[in-house]
Structure formats: structure tokens, C-alpha cells
Image (tube, rainbow, N blue to C red):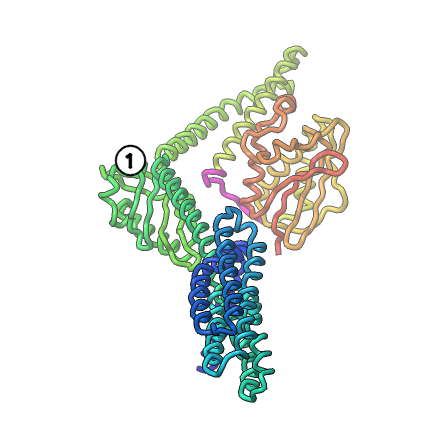
Amino acid sequence: MSNLANGIESAEHGAAAAIAEDIRDHADPALVRADRVDQLYSQLPLGMAATTVIGIIAAVELQEGRLFELVLFWGGLLALLVALHGLLFLGYRNDERRHENTEQWLRWLGIGAFAAGATWGFAAAVFFPSHADERQVFLAFLLAGVMSGGIPMYAASWPMFAAYAAAIALPFTYVLATFGNRLFAEIALLIPLFYAVSVAIAYRLNGVFLSGYRLRHAYQRQLVELDEARRQIEASGRKLALFAERAPIAVLELDAQGVLHEMNHAAEILFAYAADELAGKSVKRLVMPKYQADFDRQWATLMASRQPMSGVKVRNVRRDGLTVVCEWTVTPLVNREGQLLSVIAQGRDITAQLEAERLKKEFTSTLSHELRTPLTSIIGSLQLINAGVLGDVPKDVVELTEVAERNGQRLLDLINDILDIEKIESGKLTLNPEVLRMDELVREAMLLNKGFGDRFKVRFQPRGELTAREVTADHKRLLQVMTNLLSNAAKFSPEGEVVEITTEEAKEWLRVAVHDRGPGIPEAFRPRIFGRFNQADSTTSRQKGGTGLGLAICKRLIEMMQGRIGFQDREGGGTTFWFELPRHA
């Protein structure tokens, strides 16, 4: 327990030290100094009044026939001192730039304080030895009171009080020490102690004043900052409220139990409910009953992870009973302490979008199948004519039939690519993985595409030793990837160049790379090179042929086989396309 208490005490001291340091950091020294000077000058009227009253009483008490002239002289000094202090006070109050000249005003007040102390010290030095015991007691009591009264008077600046009190104490101590009386000599020894205690008290009070000034300015500054932060928060709140209210998508505010508190106008239109009708009710009433169990599981996962969820598709029920499919982004708002403040759900109706995508896929699939059957027959017939099966054909006719065959084949490739990409994106494409040796697959791809390379006068050639390592992949689809990469490299390489193929091993990956000497990939095109129907140079692509789907298909097929694909500039010009697959154990 004692260790715990010590730990708490240490923590409290540490916290206090941290607060003090923060206050010192936030307080402006110039403002603190200006406050000190204001405090000192605000005490001047009270000091002048007290000096006048005490001086009159002392003059009446101390005047005697033989000392009348000295008392009159001393009273004149005191009156002059009060008048000068009054002028100093008026000058300070009338100075509009006094807070900029605090050092000068503090110096003048310090001189005045020392002069006041010296005037009372003069009284001690002159009048104490000249009177009998009763007036000496009175004068000693008076001087002690005047010196003690300086503590609150000059507490905002302990050096000023030290100068003021020293001007009183030193002459009085000297008089007592040299008076010739043993008792007075002993009292003379106590006066420096009394002086030191008084200065120590003034020093402590000075520290209290400084802390107060610093606190005030620090808090004033923090209040200004808090007020500014409040205005910013209010402005942000208004912006967010306006954004939510005018947003074209539905915005819901929920609590941890899924109870709806706020909804914007778009949500009212989407669900055909007024906000007041759903406020305080569970959002589950907007979910189809047979999907509410799934909703509960997803909500429990969200509350446990406190992480945003996006792309959440939910079948929602409208007030009129119609079902709409909405895509939601759900964001839990959590404070620094980990407490859940609320949950913001943003959703949009994607029913029409899903239906349009379904119709588009059906149309594309049907059209592709309907086109591919007659197109295959046309290409086959043209190939028979060009092969001379039907006899000799005039040269002019052969040229036309060859053009027709090439363009028919291009059209068939386009249809096949469209069918492939639609199957991949709809999840209907199935793979047949098997263990393949990479060197054998690369050589097979080179052999199958040799004719394509000859057409563009480009050779395919391995660089270095091809690895015999194995991967688990679909043989047909991996050959399709290789064919797309090799055909692209052949189309865009200059005539007579060599397209090189390399294989590399990197930890658990096996990399295959195709290196060409083409013009490279433009910077503006790089972010979308693996997109659908994207071609870097449409003019060249039309001349060389191509659908713009090859790289998109490659990327999706490689990712389906748990691999990755990319490209990089080739040293000396050209581009290197590569893909990596996990090595077979």
C-alpha cells in the first residue's frame, strides 16, 4: 500500500510539474511583466494615503522644540515623496504605451521605493537617538510596521521590496548597534533576521503573483484557443450536417445496438419513411426477415472489430413492401478512449445497376455465341479456299480471301476474349490446376507462337537456362497468358529483333519474364494498362491488330492462380512483362 501511495504521490507531483511547465510554455513573459507593473502601480494610491496618514501621526508625536526644524524638514521630504509618487502614478496611467515600456516604468518605481525607504530610514537615524524611551518604542513600532507594510505593497517585485526595506533597516540597525545600550545592541542583531524573513516572505508572494499571472494568461490563451476550436467544430458540424442532408445517397446514424437516430432526406426517399417514424427503432426493420440473421452476424463482427466496412450489399425493404438491393459503407466513430460514439451508414440503391449488369452479361454472352458459330464456318470455308482444296484460285481472289480470313480470325479472337473476360468477372470460369514444369511450358509456348513471330519477323529465344522448377497452375490458361505476352512483344518489337524469355527463382515464387525491344509504355497509360479495352497507341494497335483485352485477361488469370503480374522498363529500351506463381513444394 505504501508503494502504491508513493506511486500516486509521484504521479501527482509529475502531473503538477507537467501542468506548471505547460503554463510556463503558454504564458507570454511580456504580458506577465506588464501585469506585475500594473499590480505595483495599482498599489501606489493606497501607499501614498498610508504614508501621508502615518507621516502626520509621526510628525505630531516626534515634534519637540529643539527638533521642530528636523521634523519639518523630514515632513517636507515625505510630502515631496508622496507628490512625486502621485506624478509617477498619473504618468503611468496616462501612458498609452505603458505595456511596451514596462522596464522603464519598473525602474522608476524601484527608485521611488528606495527613496521612500531611505526617508523612513532617515527618520530612524535622526529621531531615535534624540528621544526618550517612550518615543523610541513608538518609533521602533512605527518603523517595523512601515517595513512590514511594504510586503503587500511591493509583493509583485521582491527585489523592489528588498531595496525599500534595506533603506529602512540599515540605518535603524546602525543606530541601535551604536547607541551604547546592550538591549538595543541585541535588538540590532535581530533586525537583519527580521529583514531576511520579510524578504523571504516577499519572495514567496512574488512567486505566487507570478504563478497567478501566468495562469491567467495561459488560461486566457487557452480560452481563446478553445473558443476558436469551438467555432471550428461548429462550422465542421454545420458542414457535415449540410453534407449529410444534401447528400444524394442515404445516410443513417445508428448506435451500438443498431437503433436508428438520424436519417437524411435521401434515406427518407429511398425507404419511403419519414425520419420521425424510424427514429429510436432498430434498423433491422429495413432488412428482409430471411436475411436478418446474416445482418446480426455482420453487425456483431463490426462491433467487435470497430473497423469500417465497405461494399456491403443488403436486401432492404421499403415501406411499400418492395425490395431494393443497397450497397452500404459502414463507419464506426470511435473516440481516443476506444468508446463507440455512433455508427454512420452510407448507402445507395444498386438494384437497377445490378439488373443492367445482368442484362449486359446475358446480351454479351448470347451475342458472342451467336456470332462465333457462323464466324467459325466462314473462317473454315475461307481456309479451304486459300489452301487450294477447291482448285486453283486467281491471285486477285486469293489476296481478298486471305484478307477476309485474317480479319475473320481477329473478330473470332475478339469474341473469345470477350467471353473469357465475362466468364472471369462473373465467376463462371473454372481452372484445372496441375503440376507443370516451367521450362517445358515456356518452350511449348514459344513453339506454338513461332508462326506469329515469323509473321512480324521476330524470333522468340530463351535467355540463360530455363528453370525446371514446377508450379501448380491450369495448363491451358497459363499457355493463354504466355501467348498474350509473346504476341504483344512480337507485335511491338522492330523487325529482326529477338524477344527474350527468362525464368527466375525468388524464395517461394517462380518468375517468368518476356523482354521486348518495343517503344515502351507511355507514363500516362501505365496506371490503366491492365484495364479492359485499353491500348497505349490505338493507331499502332489497329495496324498490328489486337482487342485491348489481352493484358486484362492475363492479370485476372494469374491472380486466379494465386500469382501476380507486372511490367517494368527494360534497360537499353523496351519493356519487360513478368508474372510470378507460387513454386510447387
> Is residue 430 within the magenta segment?
yes
Looking at the image, residue 78 lies above or below residue 272:
below
Q: Residue furthest front?
A: 65
The magenta span reads 424-434
x and y percentages locating residue 495 in the rendered image: 75, 26
Q: Nearer the viewer, residue 83 or 347?
A: 83
Q: Quadrant of the C terminus?
A: bottom right
Q: Nearer the viewer, residue 347 or 326?
A: 347
x and y percentages locating residue 122 in the rendered image: 56, 71
x and y percentages locating residue 506 in the rendered image: 68, 52
Q: Residue at x 69, y 30 (%)?
A: 490
The reply to whether residue 79 is in sight is yes
Looking at the image, residue 176 lies above or below residue 489:
below
Looking at the image, residue 117 lies above or below residue 102:
below
Residue 119 appears left or right of 352: right
Where on the picture, by quarter, is residue 535? top right
Q: Nearer the viewer, residue 580 or 20?
A: 20
Where on the picture, by quarter, is residue 174? bottom right
Which residue is labeled 1 in the image? 269
The reply to whether residue 19 is in sight is no
Looking at the image, residue 574 lies above or below residue 86:
above
Where on the picture, by quarter, is residue 235? top left
Q: Residue at x 62, y 48 (%)?
A: 436
Question: For the residue marked with disc 1, what is the amino acid?
Answer: Ile
Residue 340 appears left or right of 84: left
